[in-house]
Image: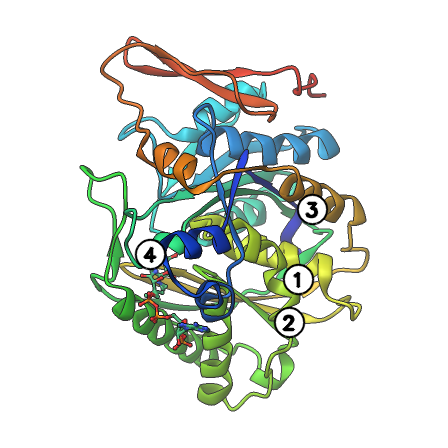
Amino acid sequence: MTSIGIHDLEVATAHHVLDLGLLAESKGIDPAKYRVGLGQDEMSMPAPDEDIVTMGASAAWEILRRHGTDGIRTLLFATESGLDQSKAAGVWVHELLGLPSQVRVVEVKQACYSATAAIQAAMGIVSRFPEERVLIIASDVARYELDSPGEPTQGAGAVAMLIGADPAILEIEPPSGIHTADVDDFWRPNDSSTAVVDGALSVRAYLDAMTGSWDDLAGRGGPAIGDIDRVVYHQPFTKMARKAQQRLDRHAGGSLGTLGLDSGSVYNRRLGNTYTASLYSSLASLLDHEEEDLTGKRLGLFSYGSGCVSELITGIVRPGYADADRSARVRAALDTRVPLDVPSYRSLHALEHSSVNDLETSHVTRAPFRFSGVRGRARQYERTDGAARLP
Ligand code: CAA
């Protein structure tokens, strides 16, 4: 059988950053609650001319710069911060990247889970047409109400992935474990720009979905827990991965302990929650920071989307997976974000672009693509000087 999986992946984020120490101080909260209790240090925040399209296009642009567009006939855009009820955000990305018209574009949604559904769809396409490659973009802006318990778990970021045969990074194994249940733990109604959440229920629902996914994987002939070397998790905040690994060890009789938790959360501690992109930025973080050579090791990837749908997949790391350039790029993107003080963060949070009146955004971002405004109720995007012509 053809081996299929993740051939490349790239992380992008937003222009601004808020240090959670400042946020804690402004509320008279011990900063250790955020840094230790939640395991978060910073959160990314988009400039007024950035959104899920500009972050997603920036991540995908880097992938196409390395691999070109040959064989790509599908772009799947996973997000839970959709910009339009009808148009897929990926169609704007298609235009910004200059992709051929023979590329179908679809948006997929189920809270933070949908990038994993996109991977499963991509694997189906590649098994039918092994010469094709599928571009997946997971991009989100996590927004909660100011002064709510969820506020320190906001963030913004995107991961682009290329799925193909004979992958260079991770060969995904066929069995996976699925768990779906109708739970009101976290959602975002159409008339709200921030999520509604029952925090305690969401943590319980996540952990229950994980054990449910494990049981399904085990029942479908998945690997024994002792044959899994590291697990990466969806990370609404990085402490959640610790809770999940503890529960997994207890439930499945494993001894993973704290293996892979620090290396798999270096990016997430600084990005904040990136919803659909969170699991895959954790994967990038593990690949870029784990000291032990991961070649040939089996990874588990636990994907959770509130509401809720979850899936546990496994994959084998391929030789030559390491990419020192990617880790340098991600570190530079994180280090060069422009810091916000708390009043500027709060006014940026309050900024909402309506589609009713035409508008032109001020030019702030240094990314290769920007949201330039609204004309005739339609969102407008443009390349900036940073975007070189694609091959
Ligand atoms: N020093 C060190 N630790 C401290 C501390 C201090 N001074 N003060 C508190 N803590 C610890 C607490 O003991 C607690 O640790 P444990 O969870 O290990 O017990 C931790 O900090 C958090 O404290 P609280 O439980 O009091 O925090 P809270 O009630 O203010 O909110 C939250 C926590 C519910 C996660 C909230 O941030 C929230 O609602 N977040 C959004 C929802 C979310 O992320 N849910 C996760 C699962 S759902 C999902 O995964 C989908 C998704 O992306 C949203």
| CB under 8 Å between discs 2 and 1 | yes
- Ligand 1 within 8 Å, label 4 CB: yes
The CA distance from mark 2 to mark 4 is 25 Å
The local secondary structure at tag 2 comes to loop
Q: Earlier in the sequence, mark 2 or mark 1?
A: 2
The quarter of the image holding the N terminus is bottom right
Q: Earlier in the sequence, mark 4 or mark 3?
A: 4
Mark 3, residues whose alpha carbon is within 10 Å: few (<14), some, or many (≥20)?
some
Picture disc at residue 286: 1
All told, the count of numbered labels is 4
Ligand 1, by image quadrant, is bottom left
Amino acid type shown at disc 1? Leu
Of tags 2 and 3, the one toward the viewer is 3
Read off the residue under disc 2: 260
The quarter of the image holding the C terminus is top right
Q: Which of marks 2 and 3 is nearer the N terminus?
A: 2
